[in-house]
Image (cartoon, grey):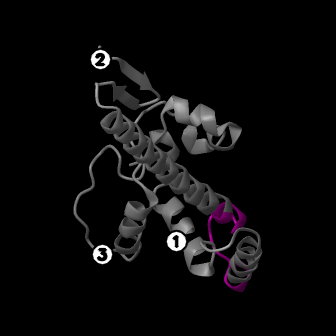
Amino acid sequence: MDEIQHSNDGLTFQATDNLLADAGRIIEGAQVAAARSLNIYLTLRNWLLGERIARELLGGEERGSYGQRLVRNLSDELTKRYGKGFDNSSLSKYVKFYRLFPQIADSLSPQLRNSLGKGIADTPSAQSTQQAEVLPWTHCRELITPLASGMPTRRLPRRGACGR
């Protein structure tokens, strides 16, 4: 069988004479691409939530009981609507994430920025056209705790470290 090569949005496939192996490569490649896209969107969702909450908290500065009440009420409503992932602790982490990496939108590729529409494209930090890979939220969450507490951490790579 002649080898046929297909490539679409980062999913590459080269046909061989083994149908089962080809089908497996297509499925596995699509699963990897879907997981990567999901991680990017979850990371951006959490950053955008952190940015929006920080702006509501008096330009990013918490105002004591008002800030706690605001986050608690928002958490209750978001959990009712969307389920897990929006408790007080998570929302606080999203705010810390935004504060530690306020320029994360700079790392978006123009393609991804366009697919997100005006929401991210209009944020102050989205003005740059610099392109880098955004780390998934699970990696960024691991970076937030030591950075927020002032603990020393290993040096982060220039490109890909939560938009740094």
Query: Residue 109 in the image: x percent, y percent?
Result: 48, 33
Query: Residue 115 in the image: x percent, y percent?
Result: 61, 35
Q: Is residue 65 magenta?
A: yes
Q: Please give the name of the residue rendered at 63% of the width and 64% of the height, measured from the top-left corner.
A: 54
Instruction: Specify the farthest residue to the bottom.
Output: 65
Query: Residue 163 in the image: x percent, y percent?
Result: 42, 48
Task: Give residue 28's quadrant in the image.
Answer: top left
Q: Please give the name of the residue rendered at 67% of the width and 36% of the height, measured from the top-left corner.
A: 117
Q: Which amino acid does label 1 sit on?
A: Lys
Question: Which of pointers 1 and 2 lies earlier in the amino acid sequence?
Answer: 2
Q: Does the magenta stretch include residue 122?
A: no
Identify the residue position indicated by label 1 in the image.
Answer: 93
CA separation in Å, label 1 and label 2: 49 Å
Q: What residue type is labelled 2?
A: Glu
* Residue 59 horizontal side relative to residue 42, left or right: right
Q: Please give the name of the residue rendered at 67% of the width and 59% of the height, measured from the top-left corner.
A: 52
Q: What stretch is highlighted in magenta?
A: 53-67
State the residue in front, 69 or 19.
19
Does residue 103 show up? no
CA separation in Å, label 1 and label 3: 16 Å
Label 3 secondary element: loop
Identify the residue position indicated by label 3 in the image.
Answer: 151
State the residue in front, 96 or 75.
75
Query: Residue 144 in the image: x percent, y percent?
Result: 41, 68
**Residue 18 versus residue 50 in the image, above or below:** above
* Residue 42 horizontal side relative to residue 144, left or right: right
Q: Nearer the viewer, mark 1 or mark 2?
A: 2
Q: What mark, if any, has residue 3 been given in the picture? A: 2
